[in-house]
Amino acid sequence: MYGVRGSIAAPGPSTARYGGNTSCVRVDGPGGAVLVLDAGSGIRDLRLSKALRRVDVLLTHLHMDHIQGLGFFSALYDPSMEVHIWGPASATLSLEARLRRYLSPPLFPVMLSDVPCRLEFHHVGRERVPIGPFHVRAARVCHPGPTVGYRIETPQASLAYIPDHEPALGARRFPIDPDWTSGFDLAQKVDLLLHDAQYTREEYANCVGWGHSTMRDALAFAVQAGVKRFVPFHHDPARDDEALDRVVAAAVKEVGPDFAVTPAAEGAVFALA
Amino acid sequence: MAQQPVELILARQLAGYLSVPVLVLDPAGVVLFYNEPAERILGVRFEETGRLGPEEADRLIEVSDDPAAGPEDAGRPLVTALQQRRPAHARRWLLRRGDRVRLQVELTAFPLIGQGDRLLGAVAMFWEHQDP
């Protein structure tokens, strides 16, 4: 994991243990294939093998904390690399056109059209897509603006990545029926779920509709989906390491999951059989 | 049962908070959800029935033209919404078959069209007619 923080980077001594960079996760698959999930500030530290010739970047949405590192991704400046960027279009603009709004002056000095790698854009649909050894499925999830979550599978393992998600929005109680729960199909019975868990219940009361979950709701979602391991993700930038420990412990005590709960941390590695 | 698209999930959540009767339908005309105010119109509770197919809905209510309605009321709003992908509005008499109560209503229906021009369903709202 290269970035696990939500909303804005939060570096400093108080967040050093879990890390201050925004969303970026690397998935290594059979045969050396690499997927990169989101391009937050953490992507700057992501280095690829010199032998690799293709990398696929899967963007969940285009909020700044998920794309702000893209212009600093070393693979973009390697002429021998093929970089495939996947993500949602909007109702009127392509993914590429939307990204160019950021990766162009005056917000960024380098135009996307000027980077030396071979760059390709792909709109994510509802179909399951093979990318190298992975099968990737995207689905729109409850979050402001076009936003997807991803389910990534190999014959050996499965992972769901839903870093910005508010499945409890508008629900009088949560969880509700699985059929009516945003993101449920993506997360169902995965080996590892990385899911938004930004707020405490008290904080959420002032942030309803902003597209994020409480730690308790995220954990309840994980229980409902029957996941094997849960990784709370998208930590609030105002949450220091000790406070995050307390929020996780309280939610685990309340919900009582029968699987491991391990808060996302920069540098953490999860091996999926 | 397959998971509903997020657009329908949000439509259902919104309907759950409104005080006007609202039905959420899939593209085949199956009523996937109706809110509490709509339970009064249909004469049944959602928790008891769950989703309603067109035949089941027809067993609960009978919708007929209102002779006093103007020519602009011609057509069936839900059919228009689902088949022509246009919003429509009409004034109708509605007979609740369970207790034979007749209600004069106005019906607004609009299609839910997602990304890629995908028809996800429709929303129908009932407005009980109030005499001035």
Image: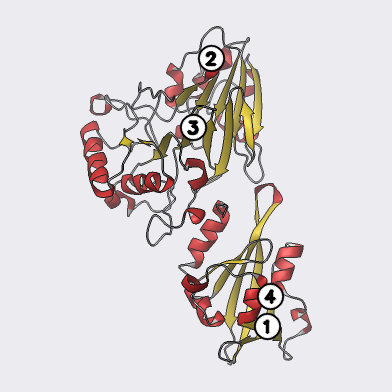
Q: Is residue A227 above or below residue B96?
A: above
Q: In the figure, is residue A217 to the left or right of B51?
A: left
Q: Amino acid at mark 2?
A: Gly
Q: CA distance from mark 2 to mark 3?
A: 17 Å
Alpha-carbon neighbours of circle 3 within 10 Å: few (<14), some, or many (≥20)? Answer: many
Q: CA distance from mark 4 to mark 3?
A: 47 Å
Q: Amino acid at mark 1?
A: Val
Q: CA distance from mark 3 to mark 1?
A: 49 Å
Using the rendered image of the protein, determine whether residue A60 is visible from the camera's viewpoint.
Answer: no
What kind of element bears circle 4? strand
Q: Which residue is mark 4?
A: B89
Residue B63 is labelled as 1
Task: Name the residue located 52 percent from the left edge and 57 percent from the top edge.
Answer: B10
**Depth-wise, is mark 1 or mark 2 nearer the camera?**
2
Q: Which residue is mark 2?
A: A32
* Residue A122, quarter of picture: top right
Q: Are marks 4 and 3 in contact (CB under 8 Å)?
A: no
Q: Are marks 2 and 4 in contact (CB under 8 Å)?
A: no
List x then y, in percent, for residue A240.
25, 33
Q: Which residue is mark 3?
A: A158
Using the rendered image of the protein, determine whether residue A109 is visible from the camera's viewpoint.
Answer: yes
Same chain for mark 4 and mark 1? The answer is: yes
Q: Quadrant of the N terminus of chain A?
A: top left
List x then y, in percent, for residue A271.
41, 23
Q: Amino acid at mark 3?
A: Ser
